[in-house]
Amino acid sequence: MATRQPDLNIALIGYGFMGAAHSQGWRVAPRFFDLPRQPHRSVIVGRDAERAAAAADKYGWIEVETDWRRVIERDDIDLVDICSPGNSHAEIAIAALAAGKHVLCEKPLANSVEEAELMARAAEEAASRGVFAMVGFSYRRVPAISFARELVAQGRIGEIRQVRAQYLQDWLVDARGPMTWRLDKTLAGSGSLGDIGAHAVDSVQFITGQSIESVSGILHTFVTERPLLGESIGLGGTASDEFGPVTVDDAALFTAKLSGGAIGAFEATRYATGRKNALRLEFSGTEGAIAFDLERMNELEFYDRRDPAGEQGFRRILVTEPEHPYASAWWPTGHGLGYDHPFAHQVRDLVVDIAEQRQPRPSFADGLQVQRVLGAVEQSAAEGSAWVGTEGH
Amino acid sequence: MATRQPDLNIALIGYGFMGAAHSQGWRVAPRFFDLPRQPHRSVIVGRDAERAAAAADKYGWIEVETDWRRVIERDDIDLVDICSPGNSHAEIAIAALAAGKHVLCEKPLANSVEEAELMARAAEEAASRGVFAMVGFSYRRVPAISFARELVAQGRIGEIRQVRAQYLQDWLVDARGPMTWRLDKTLAGSGSLGDIGAHAVDSVQFITGQSIESVSGILHTFVTERPLLGESIGLGGTASDEFGPVTVDDAALFTAKLSGGAIGAFEATRYATGRKNALRLEFSGTEGAIAFDLERMNELEFYDRRDPAGEQGFRRILVTEPEHPYASAWWPTGHGLGYDHPFAHQVRDLVVDIAEQRQPRPSFADGLQVQRVLGAVEQSAAEGSAWVGTEGH
Amino acid sequence: MATRQPDLNIALIGYGFMGAAHSQGWRVAPRFFDLPRQPHRSVIVGRDAERAAAAADKYGWIEVETDWRRVIERDDIDLVDICSPGNSHAEIAIAALAAGKHVLCEKPLANSVEEAELMARAAEEAASRGVFAMVGFSYRRVPAISFARELVAQGRIGEIRQVRAQYLQDWLVDARGPMTWRLDKTLAGSGSLGDIGAHAVDSVQFITGQSIESVSGILHTFVTERPLLGESIGLGGTASDEFGPVTVDDAALFTAKLSGGAIGAFEATRYATGRKNALRLEFSGTEGAIAFDLERMNELEFYDRRDPAGEQGFRRILVTEPEHPYASAWWPTGHGLGYDHPFAHQVRDLVVDIAEQRQPRPSFADGLQVQRVLGAVEQSAAEGSAWVGTEGH
Amino acid sequence: MATRQPDLNIALIGYGFMGAAHSQGWRVAPRFFDLPRQPHRSVIVGRDAERAAAAADKYGWIEVETDWRRVIERDDIDLVDICSPGNSHAEIAIAALAAGKHVLCEKPLANSVEEAELMARAAEEAASRGVFAMVGFSYRRVPAISFARELVAQGRIGEIRQVRAQYLQDWLVDARGPMTWRLDKTLAGSGSLGDIGAHAVDSVQFITGQSIESVSGILHTFVTERPLLGESIGLGGTASDEFGPVTVDDAALFTAKLSGGAIGAFEATRYATGRKNALRLEFSGTEGAIAFDLERMNELEFYDRRDPAGEQGFRRILVTEPEHPYASAWWPTGHGLGYDHPFAHQVRDLVVDIAEQRQPRPSFADGLQVQRVLGAVEQSAAEGSAWVGTEGH
């Protein structure tokens, strides 16, 4: 990274939870990583001018726009970071890529397989012009998850036979909690499946290096009607007096067959009382095993069958050593990272890939593959849990 | 339990792993519990006279028989404890009940639903004559599991919405490990599903008080051929040079709908590398949650949504307090129990129920219900994971 | 163990908590281990004839005596198992050894260093006559603790630099809980220090193979007066209206220097709210580390610095594999043991050593060494935490 | 916070590990907290102009100075943030306060009690002029630690009887690892004691609201000579061929008496093999207990004796709920924080206190009290572990 390349001007679309997290990534990454192009938080875009201005002030963006089309027309913008709701992803991303802007698009890629296909095609075409697109599965950059992938790739657990993947949250347990856009199929596309199940699917495919080829599953809605939202707070908010229908799944359960021969059991739910953000992954291989829980994101458990008999056990590895992905950029051994640090890793990798004119991962094609799995789960659920291939999706 | 009733003479059929565990139950229970009838380890039965005699010596049984029919004919035997392989259960149990002997039958009740139905009918008829049958799901008597049932029954976790049940072992991970009777469908009936999946099913039905009404699942065999068994050691043994086909499932994965409206995700496997005996249960309710792992059998995790906001968390309860089931019979607080103690609890409850002329639980009807679930899983697996009701099974 | 030697007739003195635990050891050991001499539960001794008879019935002893001197005079008794309070140990043990009886004496060996010295001398003399004495530090036979010693002896953690040893209980937290004999210095000798601190000291010396050479510490009594005992329940009981002074320590804290150069931090307390039976040990060595918690007695944590960089972490080893001490006598892998199993291990090792005419460990000399450490702690506490050597003690 | 006050221009002295952490605090705090005065990263000071310039670029400071005296003379600097080695703290802080600059001084406050006294006096005098000083015990702002203090203050664990505090690291385990300034008494003042023991002392005093009144302890150096440092990496570095003497303690062990009657056991070490950053705290009270481990910094364990009998257990609370300190500024429930977030909390609290003309905590007087404890430990260690009061220190 000897010669520094031109700066990189960013436009961020959206200023919700993800807008805040991405802003933190853009802010922090250049301070801890040596980036070949210096990112600038140039423009933030929101339909409500007043709230967008407040967000610009809070998150540190220089300008404000209310129409994303305007930033795409601007010559001085190099990269569009899409953090708006899923139903807007396709239109924005495709337009941005066509206009020669690199794109970072928050997950899930789209609300349907069809949209995702269009996006993946647009990304492929843009890449041939040196314009790149990435989808924001930030958990790939949790050091423990990156390290798990390395261990698998090095054959440390041998051939993977079984996968367990659960994403457990509980913020909907209270049936009196109000509706939010995340419970409205029109806006969110799906419920637990698309929101958090997508992370489980991407993490499994990333770590194993295998793709999910077919699924059998169910979707379930425990609370079919909720009070409409008063004021928004965190992922929830206060309740009003009127009620509206919940049109997405509360929980998704499915079984999967992977391209390398493994079978997997998946669950995504927002009703796992007491579990706050438990993305739990376990990989059972012929030579070892790996287990992870996002609630303890600085730890990875690794079982090595090649250890001497009697000395085998799951090792609790604190993934904060110089040998671990991203770790040496931060603090000394044992000083853990939090939820937002992987957003800085995402920025770092994206900027390096753009500078080196290399396709960043996860690509839109990777995001499409996740979307196909989600689509296949929905179809299987609609067809009495019949097995559905992901190819057609 | 003022007046002591006549002693109870026991005949034990079988002297393998389960014969040893049951013997320990009969030996120890009278020393720690005040039993209304004093059990005697009268006769042990094994086809191989020499090995049966060695077992009698080792486990402390007075007499030896080589034919179970002989002990059923004897007037001095009050109870037949069946620890022989599953394919012999039905014949022995039905004959013993017909002969007026109480029966304790190791799980799973039988190798097929048909056999289990005959047994349940025989047990029902015998009960009307004051002759009782129990199936040996000993884990119901793990204090943490009994206590979990109490918490659920008291409404401490509210209405249960989701169940997670995994029984993870890894003793078949090595593909060079030899065949045993547990891998032969003719003898074992099924593989992980019947052997350990049965425990998961019974534990869930016991704790929730709900029955599984329908299932969708798959069975999978990772290693389809193994060396034939040389010498038997523990659950495995040494390998010979010849090979034979594995005719049972290595792993079973299924989704279930319960009578109370909950949905459940089940897994039983002997290929979960690094997991030695992890029966893991989690119940997500409207007011709380319960989690358990048999590898830490003296602990129960309990989450109470009625705790003050900010103070909620899974409590690690050491189930060794006087308030906990069975605990006060043993050691002071914090002094844990092991795998075999629940067999003493099983003896205690069975003997008390017999003395009080009350149907012991789990009854053969309970065992049949488990069998129906297992049968439905097998059918669903054969039918492409279609949903299958347990009623017809 | 080809030729079987004569049977071994046991007399048990005492029928409290320890009497029950030792009885279970004598009952169970012959069923799981192949013993060269067959132990018989011949006589139980208690001053109260009625309660002794009830104990004989409950714990399975054939005869009852009310005076321990009578059993020592009997020719048919081979071994005296002393489970009476500490202030009686010296007199009984010395008399029994003089009468040619092997002795198993519950810990702590005595209530004072002086008594312990007399006992050790008597044991040494008896050993020269083929009569052996052992002190009942049963935790040495917890498989995880035995295995820790093996790992240390094999150099798996290198040279030990630091030791952490805590024995945390909480059954005295409630200041309204009643007095028991364990709080009366005349009967118990000391409080937490002698009762549970002794286990910590013995376990550390056993695992490291080093002896504690000097100490600096304090003793503290939080609740100096308690209601007198009504009815005894577990380790506590109900309270009466009168009060009495607590004359023992509630907590003991001390620092130690070990013969191999390690330094250690010790704590024994019955006021560690929420900790029920947490004997916690940690050994920090130049090449690795070992950690243990008795509340999870089937697990040992082992950290190996020789693992590849980035892959190091504490391994949670389930000490239930055939490679682990005592484990193969019991159940398959992953099926844990409880508090009472080590008492069977203790019987096994004692009987084998007697049969092979070999000094069993821990010997009375080992018990004396523990007593010297406890005495040195008391002296240091009395002298403002001055360093006190254990040699003079 | 309606009317915004003038901006706050910061000068940072030092650009090592702590300089990086403080920079991150200044950078991030304004984005997540609504601050009454806007901090500017105005000047960074380092003796080596080139390295200081690089740090300015990396950490985002506008100007560079090589002499801290120059920034103290500047009128446009409002606050001096001291992250240089401990032996420079007193001179800089006293001069800055005299010049009317607010001061944030990294811990430990000074290398000796004498210096700390001068600093505390200077701070007290400055406070009377509206100029404030704070010492940087950032762990007070770990949400779990702040929350622990709240629980104690609310009486949730009753009267505290016992404290356990360990700060365990292992980065010096390898005797071939090189010298660093942290092992040189002239620069570092002390070893484990001052570096990490200081955190344990401050955390305990903060959470309990009690001060340590007397101590008895030892200091120990395991490796007395090490290779001189080649290149610095993290807390360590590469080794050269020459050797130098280690002049600080490797481990410190001490017992303490607290002002509220509790007794405490403390340990600080860099030789706890396998423990990377384990600040472990446990508080045993009459009504409950609290336990914490910095390696799992998003969790707090809380045991409530007022829970129903049989339902008591340590609750694992994820300290990420809106009810928890600082948490609502960040991410949704269950999305954890890392090592650097508390530095933002520190900035937030400091800026608010300055704006409200209120003494920030921990004050230099608080830092002095910690220093007195450390000094008393050193004196006790020099006097054969005699008890030493902290008053004279």
Image: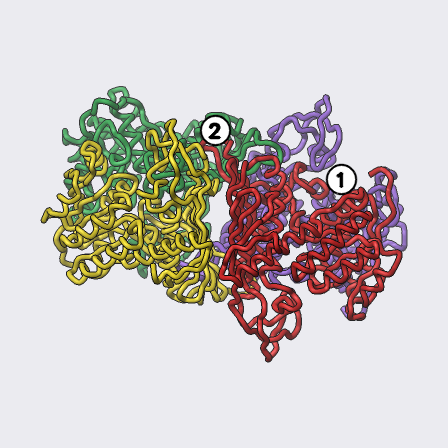
Chain colours: A red, B yellow, C green, D purple
Visible in this render: residue B68? yes
Q: Nearer the viewer, mark 2 or mark 1?
A: 2
Q: Point out which mark residue D87 bears.
A: 1
Hey, what amino acid is under mark 1? Asn
Q: Residue D149 at x, y = what percent?
A: 59, 57
Q: Point out which mark residue D223 bears.
A: none
Tell me the quarter of the picture where residue D69 sits. Answer: top right
Cα separation, mark 2 vs mark 1, equals 42 Å
What subunit carries mark 2?
A: C
Q: Residue C324 at x, y = what percent?
A: 40, 33
Residue located at (16% from left, 52% from top)? B101
Q: Quadrant of the C terminus of chain C?
A: top left
Q: Residue C27 at x, y = what percent?
A: 24, 39
What subunit carries mark 1?
A: D
Residue located at (64% from left, 41% from top)? A320
Q: Residue A64 at x, y = what percent?
A: 83, 64
Residue located at (15% from left, 35% from top)? C70
Horizontal relation, residue B267 to residue B127: left or right: right
Horizontal relation, residue A392 to residue B255: left or right: right
Q: Secondary structure at mark 1?
A: helix
Horizontal relation, residue D264 to residue A393: left or right: left
Hey, what amino acid is under mark 2? Val
- Residue tagged 2: C152
Q: Tell me: residue D144, above or below residue D193.
A: below
